[in-house]
């Protein structure tokens, strides 16, 4: 899939790569699996630093979450202390544009002279 696309257009966008992965292209799936593994290593570090109760993958990551999640979980198990990571759940958001909604919420609060309290 990707080789035909690259030969035709001489480039592959992130959206095209995601669509190829969703459609079952093994090269695209492998690429995102590696990304998921690296993300999992980062999440393992996050668990050691702040020990979150939950980590939610959102935005573009949510779109291919079922491809990313197994690799994220594998890396978290490999790179974190089990006593910490077993209490952290990793989920895929069903909201694909959550960052845009949050940005809009902050802008609306600012227009009303309010601030966001995240404590």
Image (cartoon, grey):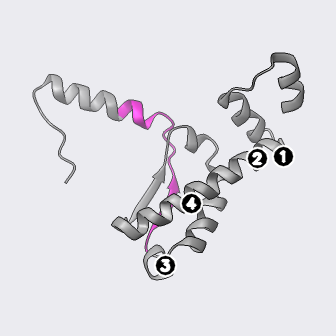
**Distance between the alpha carbons at the discs numbered 3 and 2:** 28 Å
Question: Mark 3 touching mark 1, by CB under 8 A?
Answer: no
Give the distance between the C-alpha atoms of the residues marked 1 and 2, in whole angstroms.
5 Å
Residue, disc 3? 81
Task: Please state which of the two labelled residues, at mark 3 or mark 2, is closer to the viewer.
Answer: 3
Q: Which residues are magenta?
A: 87-101
* Pointer 3 local density, CA inside 10 Å: few below 14, some 14–19, many at least 20: some
Q: Residues within 10 Å of mark 1 (few under 14, many from 20)?
A: some
Q: Nearer the viewer, mark 3 or mark 1?
A: 3
Q: Quadrant of the C terminus?
A: bottom left
Element assignment for label 4: helix
> Front-most of 83 and 106?
83
Which numbered tag is attached to residue 29? Answer: 2
With 44 as the anchor, is 36 left or right in this view?
Answer: right
Residue 61 image position (x, y, % from top left) = 57, 43
- Which residue is outermost to the left? 113
Mark 2 residue crowding within 10 angstroms, few (<14) / some (14–19) / many (20+): many
**Quick one: 48 or 26, which is closer to the camera?**
48
Tell me the quadrant of the picture where the N terminus can be found: top right
């Amino acid at each position: 899939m990707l080789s035909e696309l690259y030969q035709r257009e001489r480039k592959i966008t992130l959206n095209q790569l995601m669509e190829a992965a969703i459609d079952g292209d093994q090269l695209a799936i492998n690429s995102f699996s590696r990304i998921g593994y690296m993300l999992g290593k980062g999440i393992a570090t996050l668990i050691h630093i702040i020990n979150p109760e939950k980590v939610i993958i959102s935005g573009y990551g949510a779109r291919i979450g079922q491809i990313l999640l197994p690799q994220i979980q594998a890396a978290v198990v490999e790179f974190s202390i089990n006593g910490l990571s077993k209490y952290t759940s990793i989920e895929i958001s069903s909201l694909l544009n959550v960052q845009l909604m949050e940005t809009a919420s902050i802008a609306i609060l600012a227009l009303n002279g309010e601030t966001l309290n995240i404590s």
